[in-house]
Image: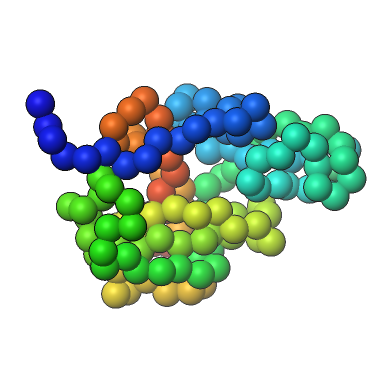
Amino acid sequence: MSTKPNPPQPEPSLDSAPYWESLKQGTFAIQRCTACHQWQFPMLGACRHCGGTLALQPLSGKGTIYSFIVNHRAAAPGFEDLLPYAVALVSPDEAPKLHIPGRIVGIAHEDVAIGQRVTAEIVDHPGGEWKVPVFRAGPT
Ligand SMILES: [Zn+2]
C-alpha cells in the first residue's frame, strides 16, 4: 500500500455536482444560461447576469492562458513528483471573460506564457474517483 499523500478531494455542492459528474463521464462542460446564454464558471444556482436557469454545456476545451503561476513547492499534497509545475487560469474560446484554473501539461514550466494556446484534457485526480481538467500546451 502506498504511503504517498493524496491531494484534497473535490467536495461537490448542489450547484457543482453536475460539473464534477460530467468530468467523470469524460465531458468538460460548464454552466450556460438558458435565458441570456452567458457562460458561467464557477458553478452557481442561477445565472449571475439575469437570474435565469443554468444548464451544463460542453466546451471545445480550446483556450488561451490568461495568467499562471509556477509551483516550486507543494501547494497541496499529492503532486510532489510533478514539481515544479505551472497552474494557469485559462480563458475558454467560447467564454473569453471566464478563467478556469488547471495544471499546464506538455511543456516545460519555464516555457509557459500568457497568451499561449491550450487544449483541455480530463485526467484522473489522485486518491479518489474524481477527474479534473488539465490544459495541454500546443497548437489548437
Ligand atoms: Zn442569464
Q: Quadrant of ligand 1?
A: top right
- 116 w.r.t. 101: above or below: below
- The quadrant of the image that shows the N terminus is top left
Query: Residue 87's quadrant in the figure?
Result: bottom left
From this viewpoint, is residue 34 visible?
A: no
Residue 115 relative to residue 36: left or right: left
Please tell me how many numbered marks the rendered image carries.
0
From this viewpoint, is residue 100 visible?
A: yes
**Residue visible at 38% across and 55% down?**
103
Quick one: 106 or 129, which is closer to the camera?
129
Residue 92 relative to residue 52: left or right: left
**Residue visible at 71% across and 39% down?**
44
**Residue visible at 45% across and 62% down?**
88
Residue 60, horizontal then vertical, whole percent? 56, 45
Q: How is the image coloured?
A: rainbow
Residue 5, horizontal then vertical, whole percent? 22, 40
Quick one: 122 or 42, which is closer to the camera?
42
Residue 12 relative to residue 84: left or right: right
- 86 w.r.t. 58: above or below: below
Residue 7 relative to residue 53: left or right: left
Residue 75, horizontal then vertical, whole percent? 33, 57
Q: Residue furthest left?
A: 1
